[in-house]
Image (cartoon, rainbow, N blue to C red):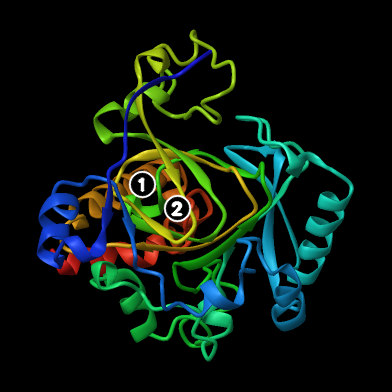
């Protein structure tokens, strides 16, 4: 089943717009944009990439190889996401190099069919290597209430805040992604319905976007399950609105940063070997999106176990953990109370 492309994402040189322009045209209007010229002085763009644009994989094995990371198997679905395994960065790099030398799946891009390609995701590089300043957050994205709040409360390794048995993982929302040509990310909207920005240190990505006004079209009749891969043969009986969706397409090149607004569903494919730096974030302009989602998720989690309230010693705590276990972010339950105090 083909998809209908209705337009593309605007590209703007950051020198041609002010911060106020960015706020008025993109933050306030919740519109995506690709920004160029913001990465010229990044250490990552010098250390992590060869002059020919290829990733310097050996550098990661040498300097950061012992880090344990989550790696997605792009060819295996597990529930609503790709199956993930834990390995060290050096193990991931060795597999990447072996696949490339053997002419594996990473040598050809097939839409919706990234079989046997591994994709390192959600690596908390900044947290692990604070002294290695790989990049500087661009001014346009510095009004970041999420990561600044977490940094202020020292939630990374604070044993008083993050107990081993509380079921809650404490960290930030700043990530490094690394994947060979053919790796991809299934259709989704970002955690919290936060904003995100994604910077290509090397490589090229293809993005498919669906605006919030059409997001209902990619859900099933019960509004519970979302389409996994828009290039699959999507079942029209289960997803009756899918063919009506009109997508925006974007090709993101090396040294370009894409701004992803709140509630925009997107699917992303790596057209080349790619390394990217990604942040999730929110501020006053999208706080209403975030709070609405958290409130609805909390209510749903609470209703789901309402029948055991009378026999539960810590019903509220169980609600919190149930919410944490059934969402993309295990910290939503901590954030909801803080967000309500900000409104």
Please indicate whether residue 74 sits to the left or right of residue 307 in the image.
right
Q: Residues within 10 Å of mark 2 (few under 14, many from 20)?
A: many
Residue 46, horizontal then vertical, whole percent: 55, 76
Q: Which dot marks residue 297?
A: 1
Q: Residue furthest bottom?
A: 131
Q: In this view, does 338 lie above or below 136?
A: above
Q: Residues within 10 Å of mark 1 (few under 14, many from 20)?
A: some
Q: Which of 190 and 272 is in front in this view?
A: 272
Residue 121 appears in the rendering = no
Q: Is residue 59 above or below residue 290?
A: below
Residue 169's disc number: none
Q: Sequence-wise, which precedes: disc 1 or disc 2?
A: 1
Q: Classify residue 216 by image quadrant.
A: top left
**Residue at (77% x, 62% y) in the render:** 92
Which SS class for mark 1? helix
Image side of residue 233 versus residue 146, left or right: right
Badge 2 marks a residue whose secondary structure is helix
- Seen in the image, is 89 located left or right of residue 29? right
Image spot of residue 152 (x, y percent) = 34, 85
Is disc 1 in contact with disc 2, using a CB cutoff of under 8 Å?
Answer: yes
Tag 2 residue: 323
């Amino acid at each position: 089943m083909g998809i209908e492309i209705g337009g593309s994402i605007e590209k703007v040189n950051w020198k041609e717009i002010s911060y106020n322009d960015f706020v008025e045209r993109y933050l306030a209007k919740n519109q995506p944009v690709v920004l160029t010229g913001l990465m010229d002085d990044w250490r990552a763009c010098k250390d992590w990439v060869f002059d020919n644009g290829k990733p310097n994989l050996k550098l990661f094995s040498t300097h950061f190889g012992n880090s344990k990371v989550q790696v997605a198997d792009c060819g295996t679905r597990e529930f609503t996401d790709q199956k993930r395994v834990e390995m060290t960065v050096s193990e991931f790099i060795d597999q990447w190099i072996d696949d490339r030398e053997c002419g594996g799946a990473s040598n050809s891009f097939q839409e919706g069919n990234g079989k046997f390609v591994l994709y390192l995701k959600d690596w908390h590089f900044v947290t692990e290597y604070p002294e290695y300043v790989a990049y500087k957050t661009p001014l346009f994205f510095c009004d970041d209430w999420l990561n600044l709040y977490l940094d202020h409360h020292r939630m990374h390794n604070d044993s008083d805040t993050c107990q081993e048995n509380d079921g809650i993982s404490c960290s930030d929302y700043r990530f490094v992604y690394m994947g060979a040509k053919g790796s991809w990310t299934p259709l989704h909207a970002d955690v919290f319905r936060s904003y995100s920005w994604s910077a290509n240190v090397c490589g090229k990505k293809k993005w498919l976007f669906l605006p919030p006004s059409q997001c209902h079209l990619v859900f099933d009749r019960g509004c519970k399950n979302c389409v996994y891969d828009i290039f699959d043969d999507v079942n029209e009986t289960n997803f009756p609105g899918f063919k009506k969706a009109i997508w925006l397409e974007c090709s993101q090149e090396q040294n370009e940063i894409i701004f992803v607004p709140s509630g925009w569903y997107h699917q992303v494919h790596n057209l080349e070997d790619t390394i990217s730096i990604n942040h999730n974030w929110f501020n006053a302009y999208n706080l209403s999106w975030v709070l609405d989602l958290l409130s609805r998720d909390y209510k749903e989690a609470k209703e789901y176990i309402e029948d055991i309230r009378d026999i539960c010693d810590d019903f509220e705590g169980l609600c919190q953990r149930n919410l944490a276990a059934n969402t993309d972010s295990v910290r939503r339950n901590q954030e909801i109370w803080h967000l309500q105090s900000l409104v």
